[in-house]
Image (spheres, helix red, strand yellow):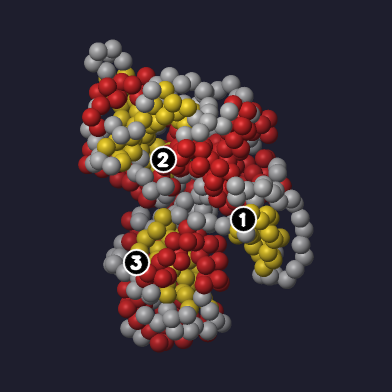
Amino acid sequence: MVARLTRFCYRGKINDFVEFYACKFNDFEVKYRYKINDFGVFMTFRRKIYDKFIDWKRESNGKSALLVEGARRVGKSTIVEEFAKNEYKSYILIDFTKAPQEVFKLFDDVSDLNYIFMRLQIIYKKDLYERKSLVIFDEVQFCPKARQAIKHLVADHRYDYMETGSLISIRKNVKDILIPSEERPIQMYPMDYEEFKWALGDTVTIKFLREAFEKRKPFGDDLNRTLMRDFRLYMLVGGMPKVVSTYLETNNMRLVDEEKRDILRLYESDFMKIDSTGKAALLFNSIPSQLEKNASRYQVSSVLENQRNSTVLELIAEMESSKTVLVSYKSNDPNAGLARTKDLENFKLFVCDTGLFTTMLFLDKDFTENVIYERLLSDKLSVNLGYLYENVVAQILKANGNSLFYYAFLDEKSRHNFEIDFLLARKNKVCPIEVKSSGYKTHASLDAFCAKYSSRILDKYLLNTKDLGKDKDVLSLPVYMTMFL
């Protein structure tokens, strides 16, 4: 069963919550919560990270604080507050982007926790109950001393603590503070394809895809075309909750594109905080053109004059820590210990959300015209979009907990350059992945790589737009099955 939300209007009190049930399948209800605010209604989508919050609460029992890291606008604050509402008797949310100065001053001296807790309850007009309340430090990077205080707050053990933040690790946000060992970090990413399908009211498709993958069962061309069109919709909209909400409410791709452009402008502003010279912003904005070149690495010298890859390593590391950029490093000796073979000077950059990446492809226009979206959705745009598919594969692999690696080499016999787009380490071996934007089932790079490193190979994957199939020992998968690798 697939259900689609339609646009609606609701009048209610500010901060009221209203629940709508989009569909029901096998007694599992897909629930959306809408909070009435000054601008109308916004959605709280079901997110997988919520289950990890539950595990932390049970396993930690107040012995650690949970730090939720992620790029701006991935929904950190929303899902953490939702967790607080559902799982605790009370909570206090301290948003350090707008907290009064007296709150900041409380963390200058944490020797008297009783006083701090008393002041917080008065300021936020919320009661705290021992072992039944949660204190949230939202955007904690703006108050490093509050982050440092976690050590003492956790040791006190009266309440639970969660932190959210972006740009957590950049130098100015950790300068002169001691990072608490009691802090357990967890990464939050944009909505993945399954979460996107949940948002559309579809709880069936991913189960269906998983079963087909496990049984190696093809769908047939007609059904695969439909499934690919559905997946391309995800590639166009992306996984930023506000963007998904706009799509559901309006079904207007121009408005969707405007939301994404707002996020990209926000990221540019963040990059200026990382590097006031503007180099980080230039490197970020050049990601599509760099991938389009199909070169074996990001060519820094073509973006920044008189700069080489070796001169921007620290900057790349800080961009990666912002979570807005995904970095794939070349492996010098592909084997199960990929991290040990990382070549820091040879890398490729991807964008954390493919929906944002799609908009970046057409930033030369005032807005991404609906005709472009429609052609992309129908797979009829004339340009080669292999790098668009590479970006979504990188996004999926990273969200599933994989570090990103690739391999490029010169075949000594043919004198031809080959490249493996991604490498996964599995069971003391490697799984090479080649990505194609078309239905072509040739895999010369896979063949050359496997001939060179035959004893190191576990499984070989070709990701393209066609139905599941097998060519000897190469498993050809539609790109929407990347999530199962």
Residue placed under numbered mark 2 in the picture: 485
Camera-nearest label, 2 or 3: 2
Q: In this view, does 162 lie above or below 252?
A: below
C-alpha distance separating marks 1 and 2: 27 Å
Residue placed under numbered mark 3 in the picture: 183
Q: Residues within 10 Å of mark 1 (few under 14, many from 20)?
A: few
C-alpha distance separating marks 2 and 3: 30 Å
Q: Earlier in the sequence, mark 2 or mark 3?
A: 3
Going 68% across and 70% down the picture, which residue do you hit?
16
Residue placed under numbered mark 1 in the picture: 26
Q: Is residue 178 above or below residue 24?
A: below
Going 36% across and 45% down the picture, which residue do you hit?
402
Q: Earlier in the sequence, mark 3 or mark 1?
A: 1
Front-most of residues 393 and 96: 393
Direction top: furthest residue: 414
Give the amino acid at mark 2.
Leu
Marks 1 & 2, CB-CB < 8 Å contact:
no
Q: In this view, does 422 lie above or below 397?
A: above
The x and y percentages for residue 252 are 70, 42
Q: How crowded is mark 2: few (under 14 residues within 10 Å), some or many (20 or more)?
A: some
- The disc placed on residue 298 is none
Going 27% across and 13% down the picture, which residue do you hit?
415
C-alpha distance separating marks 3 and 1: 38 Å
